[in-house]
Image: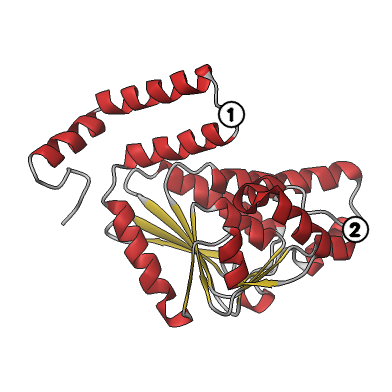
Amino acid sequence: MSIAAILSETDEHGRATITLNRPEMHNAFDDTLISALIEELRRLERERNVRVVLLAAKGKSFSSGADLNWMRRMADYSFEENRNDAMALAELMKTLANLSKPTIALVQGAAIGGGVGLVACCDIALATENASFCLSEVKLGLIPAVISPYVSTAIGARATRRYFLTAERFDANEACRLGLVHEVVPIEDLVEHADALSRRLLLNGPQAMASVKALVAEVALSSLDDDLIADTAERIAEIRASAEGREGLSAYLEKRDPNWVKG
């Protein structure tokens, strides 16, 4: 790519920042951007020194959803080609949602369609006061299918019905009330808030955080029964007996920082 669809850098603390880099296109999705994001997320998953992943964007918009030129091409696709294309976007959402490292979305502008999906897939989301959100697919006679599991998990089935059906735009405060984002901050404070959150995450055991993410994913889909209770007990027993769990407890008792805290 002559102009990279995304930018990625990792600092000395192990914080990786992926930046959507199509500001002139409002960071709209096309097959190139989707492929680049999947590849980079998978690379960061493999990097042991990466502890936290931040997802940001250049320009006025976080992401305006599907690129119009990409959509025009899809209009001439066969059913099989359309399914393969949809599976690529579904793979992106799954890869982001299932990343073992904590993820933080920095939403500095409009998030539309699949852009909302990216926000919903992140563990923590910060939005600026001027950010806005819209699930606009039905206006085009389409449905927000591949992002629906993540959006409905974030805001609940009731709110999902409304915003999927109306395609109305809502602001950052409403997104916060719904649970799509966790904090609304002035635009000049966005990076500072993300920095503070990521520093807090760096104080925690990396394996423990990965296990917490897997735990929440499992619990959210399970009924409260004896099997679930036994599963949760087994999970805590495993983490207590792990090297990281023993180090964390020892550090607490010895009133020192655990070995994963740098500086």
Q: Give me the C-alpha separation between circle 2 and circle 1.
A: 39 Å
Query: In this view of the protein, which residue sits in the foreground, 25 or 212?
Result: 212
Q: Tag on residue 222?
A: 1
The spot of residue 45 in percent (x, y) is: 44, 44
Q: Disc 2 on helix, strand or loop?
A: helix
Residue drawn at point x = 44 percent, y = 74 percent: 190
The spot of residue 210 in percent (x, y) is: 40, 39
Q: Label 2 sits on what residue type?
A: Ala
Q: Is residue 5 visible?
A: no
For disc 2, the neighbor class at 10 Å (few under 14, some 14 to 19, many from 20) is: few
Q: Is residue 254 left or right of residue 127?
A: left
Which numbered disc flags the more N-terminal residue, 2 or 1?
Answer: 2
Would you place residue 258 above or below residue 191 in this image?
A: above
Q: Is residue 168 visible?
A: yes
Q: Quadrant of the N terminus?
A: bottom right
Q: Residue furthest left?
A: 254
Q: Which residue is mark 2?
A: 75
Mark closer to the observer (2, 1) = 1
The image quadrant that residue 70 belongs to is: bottom right
For disc 1, the neighbor class at 10 Å (few under 14, some 14 to 19, many from 20) is: few
Q: Label 1 sits on what residue type?
A: Ser
The spot of residue 260 in percent (x, y) is: 22, 45
Would you place residue 246 above or below residue 97 in this image?
A: above
Q: Quadrant of the C terminus?
A: bottom left
Q: Disc 1 on helix, strand or loop?
A: loop
The spot of residue 99 in percent (x, y) is: 49, 44
